[in-house]
Amino acid sequence: MSIPRPRLRTLLITAAVTASASLSLIPLASAHTTPAAPKPTVVLVHGAFADASRWNGVVERMQRDGYPVIAPANPLRGLAEDSAYVASVLASVKGPVILVGHSYGGAVISQAAGDPRSKPWSTSPRSSRTRARN
């Protein structure tokens, strides 16, 4: 059984319009049903021979990407006192936290990361690679 050409064209156009209309509704429906998860707060801790301003470029890029960022001044009074200070900063943050420490800041965040919401990361002064610390 064959369908006459004008009727076939009408059926194909109708099918294409219906498929196009239904596909255009899919992103709208999914956008309303799955809200974006809030991004974690990133806490950047500098090393011994720097100050928090060294993170300015990183802070700007991360904030542009929608991350809340804190770069507290590391007091540089010794590991115990510095990690206690960073832990007090962490206590003021609501929600999940990602800790990033450069050089000596890596030791500080490792001590301060007793908070189970925190994920400490350390950067090596000799490498641009970053690694998770467990």
Image (cartoon, helix red, strand yellow):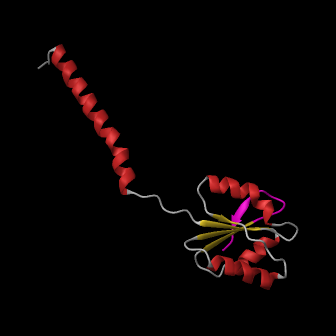
Q: Where is residue 15, by image quadrant?
A: top left
State the residue in front, 28 or 72.
72
Give the magenta range: 123-134
Q: Where is residue 9, by image quadrant?
A: top left
For the view shown, which residue lies furthest in the left direction?
1
Note whether 106 is above or below 78 in the view shown: above
For the view shown, which residue lies furthest in the right direction?
49
Could you tell me residue 56's position as x and y percent? 75, 58
Q: Is residue 130 magenta?
A: yes
Q: Is residue 17 magenta?
A: no
Q: Where is residue 55, by image quadrant?
A: bottom right
| Residue at screen point 64% across, 56% down | 63
Could you tell me residue 59's position as x and y percent? 70, 58
In the rendered view, does 131 fall on the left or right side of 75?
left
State the residue in front, 133 or 31.
31
In the rendered view, does 37 fall on the left or right side of 64?
left
Q: Quadrant of the C terminus?
A: bottom right
| Residue at screen point 19% across, 24% down | 11
Could you tell me residue 47's position as x and y percent? 82, 69
Note whether 58 is above or below 70 in the view shown: above
| Residue at screen point 46% across, 58% down | 36
In the rendered view, does 1 fall on the left or right side of 134?
left
Could you tell me residue 75's position as x and y percent? 81, 77
| Residue at screen point 73% across, 83% down | 84
What secondary structure is the stretch in magenta mostly built from?
loop
Q: Quadrant of the N terminus?
A: top left
